[in-house]
Amino acid sequence: MSAKDRKGSRDKRKNNGNALAGTLFTAAMICCCVLIYLLSKGGRNTAKDTSMDIPPQPTAQMERVYPSVQVFFERAKGYGFDAEYTEDDGYAPDKGYTLKRGGLDGGALVLSMRNMGVCGFTLMIPAAAKPDDLPDDPTPVELSLYEQRLGRYEAESAWLDTNLGSLISGIDVGSEVTYADKADMLALIWQAAKDGKAKDIDGDWGKFSVSRKEGTDRNIIYASFLLKD
């Protein structure tokens, strides 16, 4: 074999070796990519499976807060409660109070307790229904009685507009009772004062009920508010 032929044979073997090395390198790279893909996919699946094994955590139920008697009155005053109250043992074992309401007739307030806090109340005040319309040609006596009844109704209405809501807000620490709820309660009071029929409202927050009881010299409205347990 000539020197030229031997050189050509060596070059051919060299080229074949280079080609084989390139093929092996490419195959190794492909294997690495496949391995990385499988590992990453397996990691995701493992994480997913692990998360599915975690039991759902129970949602903590918010415990209702009831204010103490002192805090209740402080809150009620902050919302506009303006009656003077004196503890009355006549309502024992409940916590009862006699109310002085400025120029209006007196009333009473009895608190309902739960877990050492105030959860409701019963407000007792004279029933002052809105008078019927006057006849077309009223007599002086009819006119006088109408004006007296209308004046008493307007005074009681103005007092309740502020004080019923303030008593509820004194208890309703979570602000569950809406303005519309309070307006409905006021309307129920005047309906009961007029027709004497007991009425109530049930809400997510609890219950409000009102009734009229006959007294010796006047009728009394009993308005009760109670938060749900």
Image: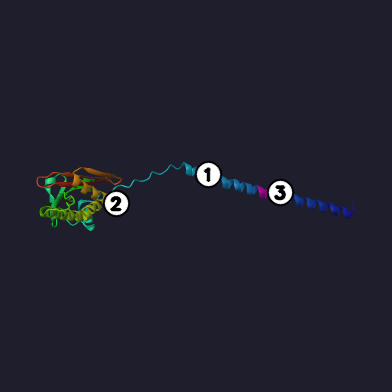
Residue 7 place in picture, x, y as percent: 85, 54
Q: Residues within 10 Å of mark 3 (few under 14, many from 20)?
A: few
Give the amino acid at mark 3. Leu
Earlier in the chain: of badge 2 and badge 1, it is: 1
Q: CA distance from mark 2 to mark 1?
A: 53 Å
Q: Which residue is mark 2?
A: 180
Within the magenta stretch, is there residue 25? yes
Disc number for residue 46: 1
**Seen from this angle, which residue lies furthest right?**
2
**Which span of residues is magenta-colored?**
24-30
Nearest to the observer: residue 175 or residue 22: 175
Colour scheme in use: rainbow
Nearest to the observer: residue 124 or residue 167: 124
Mark 1 element type: helix
Q: Residues within 10 Å of mark 2 (few under 14, many from 20)?
A: few
Whether residue 71 can be seen here: no
Q: Which residue is mark 3?
A: 24
Tell me, yes or no, whether the two marked residues, 3 and 1, touch with CB atoms within 8 Å.
no
Tell me, yes or no, whether the two marked residues, 2 and 1, touch with CB atoms within 8 Å.
no
Q: Nearer the viewer, mark 2 or mark 3?
A: 2
**Snapshot quadrant of residue 59:** top left
Earlier in the chain: of badge 3 and badge 1, it is: 3
Main secondary-structure element of the magenta-colored stretch: helix
Earlier in the chain: of badge 2 and badge 3, it is: 3
Mark 2 element type: helix
